[in-house]
Structures are given as structure tokens and as C-alpha cells.
């Protein structure tokens, strides 16, 4: 029996220049409203001039295996969809924002149509075997999407072979987005 | 069945059982089985291949069209410059197409020049007015009194118009206000300018050295792709920058050099390479001349000597030089692009070119490559065009010119508009797609020069600042709405790419080819525009090689036969200089009275309490061309002035209430010119003796409602500039500002 799919992403912080191509491609691919973002860039800087270090991350919903947003949703709109992707059923969502309050990553926003919106790992593309819009556009090839349950996939290989971190591991959410450092 | 929201929530909260029960029941408003992710429906019903115009790199794109609207832009996987990937600007082209502030109709000025008061007119009226005014200039001053400033692919049609009209005075700010010093220096050293895209092999370099170039923020798609590829393969970066740039954040060595002292650092690097034998002696023996002179010249330029000038510690200079030398010949000293900094820029670029030679990287894998061009002949025109491209003299000042300028100086054309400055005066300007107000230094001089014009016409997509000074404004269609000539620059993989309209032009905008042809017809030059339209023009060009337009249009790009690009692929290393040798020591420069080897000369310092003003790029923006793009503005809404956090704490006047990060300040330059209010970014990522602005903000064009006075303009503060005596570039990093809290009295 084939293992159940577990979609994930590896984000190579050494390659990423923080150009925001992923952000713009996501906005146009998913026809996001003005002010709505499903992914974003974080630049973190440590040290004092001239002894400095910087990490650049293209962040998005971590598609957590233990997702507090799904737990907290009173209507069942937030649910676990194909490949472990955390999705929002717009019809069931009342825009109550309980999920926004529970998400440690700020990955969700309220769409002007009244429902909550977030990264879907482009399921409309990835369920047909394509990659996400952000990974496709990325000029530095920092983003690798795929099935973590398949040890031969690029993403599984990267996570197996490279040192990596997740954002806020202390939140205990078991993210499926891994930052290669 | 009607469900109230309250009842629905109760059902939802009942859990899995409730959901299972509801499964299969659908109601119009509260469908309970709609789990999953809906398709946003942005894939095109029609996908049109073209090449991008959000910057001038020319990446291959695919425009997705649905219901007559462009929904998204993706990279064309077949195109060698995009390889299926795009930068944010390319992906954000719909923000330009659907910019609510676009020029909609032709405009004719009805008030004093510069007051920005216009009347909307028909194309007929606007073109007739333009034709009449050009003919008036011709009658009074001759055809050569007309100049064209142009930047962008649609400029092809207006350059052709100038040939038919009979004026050689065609220039672009992309030379003397950008990459000119580099082109002059590489021509002196290797006999050839580098052009765009630069023929460099970032992907295969084991060491990449950036001198003031902030690749990664400067978002030339293919170069950034290759930079990441090199990093992925374990290449090391050496970054020389007063600012901890994105590239510096990835570097093995960051050298936070004092602004204006790069030449001293480059000489010290040469000193280390030569004294420690970290250069390619055999290569130099075979391909270069002037090594003994160079060796003597840098013998005393030790890292200790350079430390006192640059502020970079000798150990760091030595270690970085050894690293650079150890990776040779796949050790790429990036030539830079925007290189007009201090007026001695050709000499700094000479030092870069010489360093590349010491490493043996010219003509080698991981270094500088020999590109190839797709063999496509031009449009077959009769040979008796009124102007064949002989150089003009309008940008040659009476006081003598710039002997090694390889292109027309846009600044020279501006100067030649001041009566008596050049061999003849320019009286009319056509400005295609370049906002001279931000591109040129010393805005006050530019405005003064424009007052001497009899006529100024602007062709643009957006109401840029320069349009406010025009007599006639002609609204061009965006690249997504027009056909153009092909793009076939020299590249390691020769190619030819098509520009084709994805949708019809919005409003009353027209493609550049149409505007130029219609104008030509009205001044009696229609015969020089024998093509029906741009597509017919391209079709004719292709037919000469037996190529079908339809094939190119379907794929977007055709690839030429691969060429040998480096010694490893069988290409000869040779330089294109007169004797085929790389000129380490330049007799040409010596003969013209310039220093034959680059030397360090101190730059003037600013007044006490002031900071040197530096500028650069953000990845989401192409100068001021994209600052009104609402889509790109979302992640990057305005520029900020970068100021060292420690320096901010000791600012005079801020003792009682220190400056807070994000607070609005005004920059005041040495001549008292004040910027619009701009947020301050207090950061460790910059030296304490300079501040940094991303170029293109602080626009004063009211019709660009988003960009208007948003952020601060480095150009507006660039009241001074230092001209490079070798090629006429305008060094612009010679201005100093002090910081005031916004809202305080001057």
C-alpha cells in the first residue's frame, strides 16, 4: 500500500535573496486581494557592525502536522486536506478569526469576501503534479515542494541531507516547511 | 432549507458525525461538503509568449489571458534568460498594465512648461502638432537640432525615425549615468565593451567578488539565478560594500570599505596577488602586456597602506585576496553595472579589469565568456538613409570631449541644449521611456536647460515627471499590449525572442511602432517605414533566414547553434585590442594624458555632521519605473533611508529625543536641497559615514497618485556630480546629507 502523502517544502536560506518573486507570483496565481499575502519574506540580522550575520526566509503556512488552527476552528472550515495541507473551506468559514489567533506564524488573514485565507500549497496545481507557483517562479531555486513521505523526492532528500530548522519549534506544531541553513 | 449562521455553527461544532451527515447535502449558501481547494482560475485560456519590459534584461515570459485580461505572467522555460523563472517585477507586470494612473490619451500642453497643465487631444491633433513643431525646428536650426533620449525596446522605432529624419543625436542615460565607465575600461583593457547581458560565467565561478555591486537586490534574473547556483555548488563570495548587502550576508568575506576608496583596496589586492605569486603568470605571459609596470606600480600598495585609506583591516584584505587568488581562473571579479560613483570610475573599472586578467579569468570558464549572437539580419532598408549612424557632435563640448566614450552621452545631449555649449545647439527633444528627472543628476541644471528647448515630446506609458515638462505627451501601450522588434542580444546561448501583444491596448494608448510610423508619415518620411506593422517588420527579418514568424510566436524564442564561449570549450582567449594583448598598462590612456595604471586619489569629504549619500536598487523595483505599480508596492511600499544605529545615537540635535526606527526624517544636502519625508531604517547594516536610499522614489509627478512624494529621491539630492574625464560619466556619489526630523523647521 502506498504511504499517505505528506506535502512539505524545503526553503534554502543560503540561496534565497529575499526578492519577493514568490510573493508576487502567489498573489497573481491565486488572485489574492490587495493587502492579502499567503507568503512573505523575513530578514533576520544578528550582531553589531561590522560583525553581522543574516538569514533570509521565504515564509508561508507551515502546513503543521499538529495544526492549532484546525483545532480552534469552531465550524470545521479549517481542515486537513490532501497531503496534509491545511485548507479553509470558504463556505463553512464565518471569519471569526479563532484560527488567526491560534496560529503562531501569522500565516492567515481575512479575505475581503469574509472568509479566512491562507497558503494552500497550490493544491489546485500540486494535486495535478505541478509544483507551487512560488517554487516555479523562484529565480534562486530556493523553494522545493514535494512529498516528504516519499524518500526519493527532492524535498525529502534535501531535508534528509541538509541541516535545517523550523520556525518556532517550541510551538509544538510539527511544521512541514523546513528551512535549510 | 434555510440555515441561519448560528444553526450552521452548531452543526459544524457537532464534529465528524455532523459533517458526515451533512455530506452530500448542498445548499446555495452553506455548502457543507465543499472541502478542498478551489482553483483560482488564473491559468490562461490563451498563453502568449513574449519578452519582459519591466526592466531591460529581456526575460522570456508567458502571459496568461482570460476573458481579455492578463491574469498572470510566468517565466518561459525555453528562454535562456529566464529559464522558466522570473524576478518579482516580471511577475508583477499586470500591476503596470492595470495601473489606474496610466496615460490614456495624447496630451498637449496648455500652460507654462513644467506646470503640468494639459489638454487631452486626438492622436491626429497630437501627431500633427509634433510634426509641425519638429519641422519648425528644422527650418530654424536644422534637422540635427533634434535629439532623442531612449531606453527600452520600443525605442527601436524612434531610433529609426531619427535615422530617417537625419539626426545622429540619440542617447540613453544607461551609458553615462550607468554602465559607461565599465564599458570604457573594458574597451581599453580588452578591446571590447561588455554590453548587456554581461558575458560572465557566475554559475561556474568558485569565487565571486562583488565590488559595490549588490546582486540579489539588483535583480537581473539570470545573474541572480547563477549566483544562487554558484552558492549551491559551494562557491565563496567576497563582497566589498559599505553596506551589509544581501550578497554580503552570504559572503565568506565582507569588506565594509569606506565609500570612495575602492581603488586603494583593489590596488592592495593586486599587491598581495603579485607579491605572493597568486596570479596566472603563464596566461599573462601569453595574453597580456604591462606586467612589470603594474608590479612596480603596486609594489608599495600594501594592505597596511590600504587600511589607512579604506578602513578595511590588513588581515581581511590579505585573507580575501588569497581566497580570490586560490580560486583562479574560475575567480570572477564582477564588473558591476551602475558604475558612475566618483568621477574616477573608468579607473576603478580598469582596476577590476586588470584584476580579472591577473586571475586569468578573461576567456575562461567561471570568468568572462565570449558570447554569440543569433545570426538574424536587420530589416532590409535602402542604403541611402538620411543618417547612417555617423557620430553626432552635439554632445561634444567646445571645450573638448571625452575621447574614450563609446556611446552618446545623455548628459552631453542635455549640456548641448544650453546655447553655445557644444558645436551646435539642440532645440528639440524626443524622450522615449526615460524619466530624465530621476535619471540625470543636478535637476536644477536640467530644468534650466529644458527652458532653451523649442519643443519637447514624451512617449511613455505612465505620466512620469518628465512628461510634466513636455509640450506633447504620447501615451504608449505597455509591452503586454504591443508587438515590437525581436530581442537577440549576444549571449552564451545565442537566441532570438519575440515580443507580441497579449491583449489589445487599453484606453487610447498606441504601440511605439505605430507612433513612430505615423509621425514619420506626417513629416514626409513615410517611405522609410515600409512595413505595415511591427509584426510585418519582424516577419520580413525572419524570412531572410527562412524562419517562420508563427514558429517563433508559438515558442517565444528560437535558440541558435551553441558557440564556444571559453578556452575550455575551444574558444581562443585573445583580447580584441589592436595588438591582441590585454592592456594591463594602457599606452592609449597615457597618450591621451590619463594615468596608464589606476591610482588612488582621495575624494572630497562632506561637511561635519553629514553623511555621504549612496543609492542602489531593491529587487521589486526598476528605478522609478515601477514605484507606482500597486502590486509591487504591496511588499515594498516605499524606500527608507538606511542610517547606522550608533551614528543615529550621536546625531546632533537628537540628544533629548533620539531618533526612533521608522520615524520620518528629511534629508538636507550640502546645497540646502530637502527631500520629501522618508522613514529612517536604523540598522547595523551600514557604515556610520554614509546613508543609503533605494533609487527611484520621492517622485514629484502628481498624476502618479501612488508614487507621488512617497519616500525620498536620491536624484533630487544629487545636485552635484563629478564628470569622469575619460568617458564623460556623471559620478553621483559625491553628495552629502544631514538628517532632520520631519516636521521640524529648517
Image (cartoon, grey):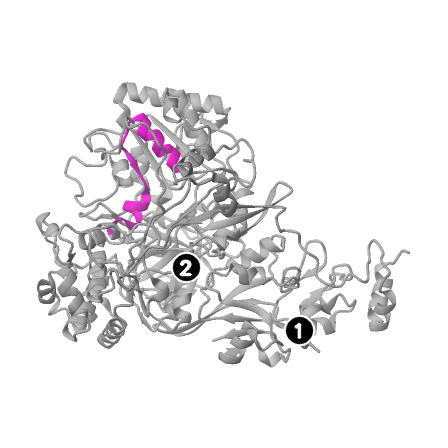
Element assignment for label 1:
loop
Location of residue B137 (image quadrant): top left
The residue that appears at 77% across and 59% down in the rendered structure is A91
Front residue of B112/B427: it is B427
Identify residue for label 2: B217
Quarter of the image that includes the N terminus of chain A: bottom right
| Circle 2 chain | B
Of B700 and B185, nearer the camera is: B185
Residue nearer the viewer, B165 or A79: B165
Q: Give coordinates of residue B193: x percent, y percent.
A: 25, 50
Q: Residue at x 11, y 69 (%)?
A: B299
Q: Say which chain tag 1 marks.
A: A
Q: Is residue B410 above or below residue B349?
A: above
Majority SS type along the magenta span: helix
The answer to whether residue B706 is visible is no
Q: Which mark is residue A5?
A: 1
Q: Nearer the viewer, mark 1 or mark 2?
A: 1
Residue B549 makes an appearance in the image = yes
Query: Which span of residues is magenta-colored?
Result: B155-181
Mark 2 residue crowding within 10 angstroms, few (<14) / some (14–19) / many (20+): many
Classify residue B335 as left or right of residue B32: left
Instruction: Kindly indicate the quadrant of the structure image that contains residue B646.
Output: bottom left
Residue at 61% x, 57% y: name it.
A36
In three-dimensional space, the C-alpha distance between marks 1 and 2, rounded to whole angstroms, equals: 37 Å
Expressed as whole percent of the image width and height from the top left, the position of residue B740 reads 38, 56
Q: Is residue B177 magenta?
A: yes
Q: Is residue B90 magenta?
A: no
Callout 1 environment at 10 Å: few (<14), some (14 to 19), or many (20+)? some
Task: Say which element carries label 2.
Answer: loop
Amino acid at each position: 500500500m502506498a504511504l499517505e502523502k505528506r506535502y512539505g517544502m524545503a526553503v534554502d536560506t543560503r540561496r534565497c535573496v529575499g526578492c519577493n518573486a514568490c510573493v508576487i507570483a502567489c498573489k497573481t496565481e491565486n488572485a489574492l486581494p490587495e493587502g492579502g499575502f499567503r507568503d512573505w519574506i523575513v530578514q533576520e540580522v544578528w550582531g553589531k557592525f561590522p560583525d553581522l550575520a543574516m538569514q533570509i526566509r521565504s515564509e508561508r503556512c507551515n502546513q503543521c502536522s499538529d495544526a492549532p488552527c484546525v483545532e480552534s476552528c469552531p465550524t470545521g472550515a479549517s481542515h486537513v486536506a490532501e497531503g496534509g495541507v491545511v485548507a479553509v473551506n470558504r463556505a463553512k468559514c464565518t471569519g471569526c478569526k479563532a484560527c488567526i489567533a491560534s496560529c503562531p506564524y501569522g500565516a492567515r488573514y481575512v479575505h475581503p469576501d469574509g472568509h479566512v485565507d491562507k497558503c494552500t500549497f497550490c493544491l489546485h496545481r500540486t494535486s495535478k503534479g505541478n509544483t507551487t507557483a512560488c517554487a516555479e517562479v523562484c529565480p534562486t531555486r530556493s523553494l522545493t515542494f514535494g512529498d516528504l513521505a516519499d524518500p526519493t523526492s527532492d524535498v525529502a532528500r534535501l531535508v534528509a541531507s541538509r541541516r535545517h530548522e523550523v520556525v518556532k519549534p517550541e510551538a509544538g506544531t510539527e511544521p512541514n516547511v523546513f528551512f535549510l541553513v | 432549507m434555510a440555515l441561519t449562521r448560528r444553526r450552521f455553527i452548531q452543526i459544524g461544532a457537532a464534529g465528524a458525525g455532523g459533517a458526515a451527515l451533512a455530506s452530500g447535502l448542498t445548499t446555495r449558501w452553506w455548502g457543507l461538503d465543499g472541502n478542498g481547494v478551489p482553483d483560482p482560475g488564473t491559468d490562461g485560456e490563451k498563453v502568449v509568449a513574449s519578452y519582459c519590459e519591466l526592466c531591460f534584461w529581456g526575460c522570456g515570459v508567458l502571459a496568461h489571458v482570460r476573458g481579455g485580461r492578463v491574469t498572470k505572467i510566468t517565466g518561459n522555460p525555453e528562454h535562456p534568460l529566464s529559464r522558466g523563472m522570473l524576478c518579482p517585477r516580471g511577475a508583477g507586470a499586470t500591476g503596470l498594465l492595470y495601473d489606474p494612473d496610466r496615460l490614456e490619451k495624447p496630451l498637449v500642453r496648455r500652460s507654462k512648461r513644467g506646470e503640468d497643465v494639459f489638454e487631452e487631444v486626438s492622436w491626429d491633433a497630437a501627431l500633427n502638432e509634433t510634426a509641425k513643431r519638429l519641422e519648425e525646428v528644422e527650418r530654424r536650426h536644422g534637422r540635427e537640432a533634434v535629439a532623442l533620449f531612449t531606453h527600452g525596446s520600443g525605442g527601436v522605432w524612434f531610433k529609426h525615425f531619427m535615422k530617417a529624419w537625419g539626426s545622429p543625436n540619440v542617447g540613453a542615460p544607461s551609458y553615462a549615468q550607468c554602465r559607461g565607465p565599465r564599458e570604457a575600461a573594458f574597451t581599453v583593457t580588452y578591446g571590447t565593451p561588455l554590453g548587456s547581458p554581461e558575458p560572465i560565467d557566475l554559475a561556474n565561478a568558485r569565487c565571486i567578488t562583488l565590488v559595490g555591486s549588490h546582486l540579489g537586490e539588483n535583480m537581473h534574473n539570470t545573474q541572480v539565478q547563477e549566483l544562487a547556483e554558484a552558492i549551491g555548488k559551494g562557491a565563496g563570495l567576497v563582497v566589498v560594500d559599505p553596506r551589509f548587502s544581501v550578497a554580503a550576508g552570504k559572503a565568506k568575506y565582507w569588506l565594509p570599505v569606506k565609500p570612495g576608496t575602492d581603488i586603494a583596496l583593489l590596488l592592495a589586492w593586486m599587491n598581495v596577488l603579485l607579491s605572493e605569486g597568486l596570479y596566472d603568470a603563464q596566461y599573462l605571459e601569453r595574453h597580456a602586456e604591462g606586467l612589470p609596470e603594474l608590479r612596480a606600480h603596486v609594489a608599495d600598495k600594501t594592505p597596511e597602506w590600504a587600511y589607512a585609506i579604506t578602513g578595511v583591516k590588513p588581515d581581511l584584505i590579505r585573507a580575501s585576496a588569497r581566497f580570490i587568488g586560490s580560486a583562479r581562473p574560475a575567480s570572477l571579479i564582477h564588473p558591476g553595472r551602475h558604475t558612475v560613483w566618483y568621477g574616477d570610475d573608468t579607473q576603478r573599472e580598469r582596476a577590476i579589469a586588470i584584476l580579472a586578467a591577473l586571475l586569468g579569468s578573461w576567456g575562461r570558464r567561471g570568468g568572462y565568456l565570449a558570447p554569440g549572437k543569433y545570426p538574424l539580419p536587420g530589416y532590409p532598408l535602402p542604403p541611402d538613409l538620411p543618417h547612417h549612424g555617423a557620430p553626432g557632435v552635439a554632445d561634444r563640448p567646445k571645450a573638448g570631449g571625452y575621447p574614450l566614450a563609446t556611446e552618446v552621452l545623455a548628459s552631453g545631449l542635455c549640456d548641448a541644449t544650453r546655447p553655445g555649449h557644444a558645436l551646435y545647439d539642440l532645440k528639440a527633444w524626443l524622450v522615449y521611456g526615460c524619466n530624465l528627472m530621476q535619471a540625470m543628476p543636478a535637476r536644477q541644471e536640467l530644468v534650466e536647460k529644458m527652458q532653451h528647448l523649442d519643443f519637447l515630446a514624451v512617449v511613455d506609458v505612465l505620466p512620469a515627471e518628465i512628461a510634466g515638462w513636455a509640450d506633447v505627451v504620447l501615451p504608449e501601450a505597455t509591452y503586454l499590449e504591443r508587438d515590437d522588434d525581436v530581442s537577440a542580444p549576444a549571449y552564451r546561448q545565442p537566441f532570438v525572442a519575440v515580443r507580441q501583444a497579449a491583449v489589445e491596448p487599453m484606453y487610447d494608448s498606441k504601440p511605439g511602432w505605430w507612433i513612430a510610423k505615423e509621425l514619420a508619415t506626417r513629416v514626409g518620411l513615410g517611405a522609410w517605414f515600409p512595413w505595415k506593422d511591427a509584426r510585418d517588420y519582424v516577419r520580413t527579418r525572419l524570412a531572410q533566414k527562412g524562419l517562420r514568424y508563427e514558429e517563433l510566436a508559438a515558442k517565444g524564442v528560437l535558440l541558435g547553434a551553441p558557440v564556444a564561449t571559453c578556452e575550455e570549450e575551444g574558444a581562443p582567449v585573445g583580447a580584441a585590442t589592436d595588438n591582441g594583448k590585454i592592456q594591463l598598462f594602457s599606452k592609449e590612456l597615457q597618450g591621451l594624458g590619463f594615468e596608464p595604471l589606476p591610482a588612488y586619489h582621495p575624494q572630497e569629504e562632506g561637511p561635519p555632521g553629514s553623511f555621504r549619500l549612496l543609492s542602489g536598487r531593491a529587487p521589486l523595483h526598476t528605478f522609478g519605473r515601477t514605484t507606482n505599480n500597486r502590486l509591487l508596492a504591496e511588499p515594498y511600499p516605499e524606500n527608507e533611508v538606511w542610517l547606522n544605529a550608533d551614528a543615529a545615537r550621536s546625531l546632533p540635535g537628537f540628544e533629548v529625543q533620539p531618533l526612533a526606527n521608522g520615524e520620518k526624517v528629511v534629508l538636507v544636502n550640502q546645497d540646502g536641497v530637502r527631500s520629501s519625508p522618508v522613514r529612517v531604517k536604523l540598522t547595523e547594516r551600514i557604515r556610520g559615514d554614509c546613508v543609503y536610499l533605494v533609487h527611484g522614489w520621492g517622485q514629484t509627478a502628481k498624476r502618479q497618485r501612488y508614487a507621488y512624494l512617497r519616500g525620498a529621491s536620491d536624484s533630487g539630492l544629487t545636485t552635484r556630480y563629478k564628470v569622469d574625464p575619460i568617458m564623460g560619466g556623471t559620478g553621483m556619489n559625491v553628495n552629502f546629507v544631514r538628517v532632520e526630523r520631519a516636521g521640524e523647521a529648517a
